[in-house]
Image (spheres, grey):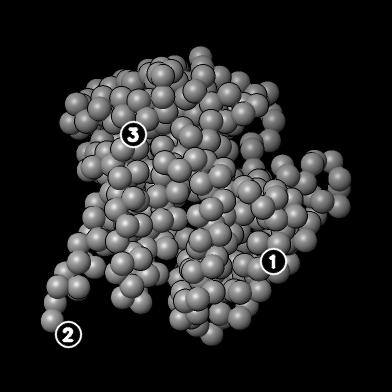
Amino acid sequence: MMPLVGQVEKGMTEGSIEDVTARLELWCRLTPKGLAFVELHSESARQRVTEALKTKLSERAESFHEISLSPSSTATEIVERLIGELDKLGSGVVSVSGFGPLFPPDKPPAELVSIFNFNRERLAALPLKQIWWMPQHVVEALRAGAPDLYSWFRGRWCLEESQRGAGAWPPDRGFFEMEESLTVEARPESVDDARRRAAYLVRRFEQALVDQETPREQLEKRFLMPAIKALREAGAYAAIRELQWRLHRDASNELLTTLDRASANPIDTAHFGDAEISYRNTLERRINTLGDVHPDTAQALNNLANLYTKQGRHTEAEVLYRRALTILERALGTSHPHVAQALNNLANLYALQSHVAEAQPLYERALRIFEQFLGSAHPYARKVRENLEEMRQAQRSPT
């Protein structure tokens, strides 16, 4: 196991300008490339950290760049422009700011969140050390709406300088995961460690509920979300299902969505029965709270269909996949990337059963949407092309 190295000075106040600067400098020194974010509450504090970091990096002749996002006519243009600017830089450290105006706090743009999420592999593949400066509401929008992209951020810190008075307690470690040290490669916790951490966070959540001083949804974000994240990264799926059983009756829709996505991972066949009950409970809650025509309801249907596919219950899976597709088309339109994903899922089911005539038009339609919306070089478009070609090759091969 790779040893822990480069510990940040313990005398610093967590979340201070000096602390965040030191952590970023250490991350830049140990990380060859990747994504990190800093939740900020003050633009002036961000500028002070940026200037201090720039000075530290110049001492070892490492290039430092700055990009400020600006609103464009479409979400796709915003993301493509960012990727284009990053691609021109080649290497070094890049500070990316300007997220606040793009994400109104009262109504985060779902399409922009989705486009960022779809392009996560392109962003992470760039040979740069990217530091994204995001207000709290942007961090929450990405965590809730783009959990796959969120998981790619290996450095996560909170710049609290403007909010903390002298002698105040530092913020809780739960959500922002202020690490005492960094490794060259981030490693997931063991299942036992993740279970212990999750149990501690759940206890903190339950204790805070008794105090009744903070709204439940805020407590869920502070304690339960990081508990689920720790379990998911460690592959502790049984523990996630235990949380589903324990929390599903009173949980907020956001927490249910997080649990749903976290448990939608490879499932041990010994737990198929438990998983089906959990997925059905989630689906029922989605319908009761969100209605029959909502993307989250479609996601719950899709997760249950995935489970049925793994069990070989193809007829039941087909019904659910088609129902999810219909919901997404009504909610998002017929040319949305989520619709393309649903088309690909249904096509995969047909291909699995060698139903080429049914699968081919679905693959082709999904491919057209991905290419139009994300470009022909996007990994999702490439994957659908591969699926389509594999099916065609299997059809041509002699039996």
Q: Residue at x 53, y 53 (%)?
A: 326
SS state under label 1: helix
Report which quarter residue 53 is drawn in.
top left
Task: Examine the rendered structure and indicate whether residue 68 appears above or below residue 313.
Answer: above
Expressed as whole percent of the image width and height from the top left, the position of residue 74 reads 41, 24
Quarter holding the C terminus is bottom left
**Observer-nearest of 243 and 254:** 254
Tell me which amino acid carries mark 3: Gln
Q: Residue at x 55, y 65 (%)?
A: 320
Task: Examine the rendered structure and indicate whether residue 16 appears above or below residue 203.
Answer: above
Q: CA distance from mark 1 to mark 3?
A: 39 Å
Quarter holding the N terminus is bottom left
Q: CA distance from mark 1 to mark 2?
A: 43 Å
Expressed as whole percent of the image width and height from the top left, the position of residue 38 reads 48, 32
Q: CA distance from mark 2 to mark 3?
A: 51 Å
Expressed as whole percent of the image width and height from the top left, the position of residue 355 reads 33, 72
Q: Residue at x 67, y 52 (%)?
A: 292
Identify the mark at residue 130; answer none if there is no mark: 3
Which residue is denoted by mark 2 in the rendering? Answer: 399
Task: Examine the rendered structure and indicate whether residue 3 appears above or below residue 26.
Answer: below
Identify the mark at residue 44; answer none if there is no mark: none
Closer to the observer: label 1 or label 3?
Answer: 1
Going by the image, does 64 lie left or right of 162?
Answer: left
Q: Residue at x 86, y 45 (%)?
A: 212
Which residue is denoted by mark 1 in the rendering? Answer: 281
Dot 1, crowdedness within 10 Å: few (<14), some or many (≥20)? some
Tell me which amino acid carries mark 1: Asn
Closer to the observer: label 2 or label 3?
Answer: 2
Q: Evaluate if marks 2 and 3 touch, with contact meaning CB atoms under 8 Å apart.
A: no
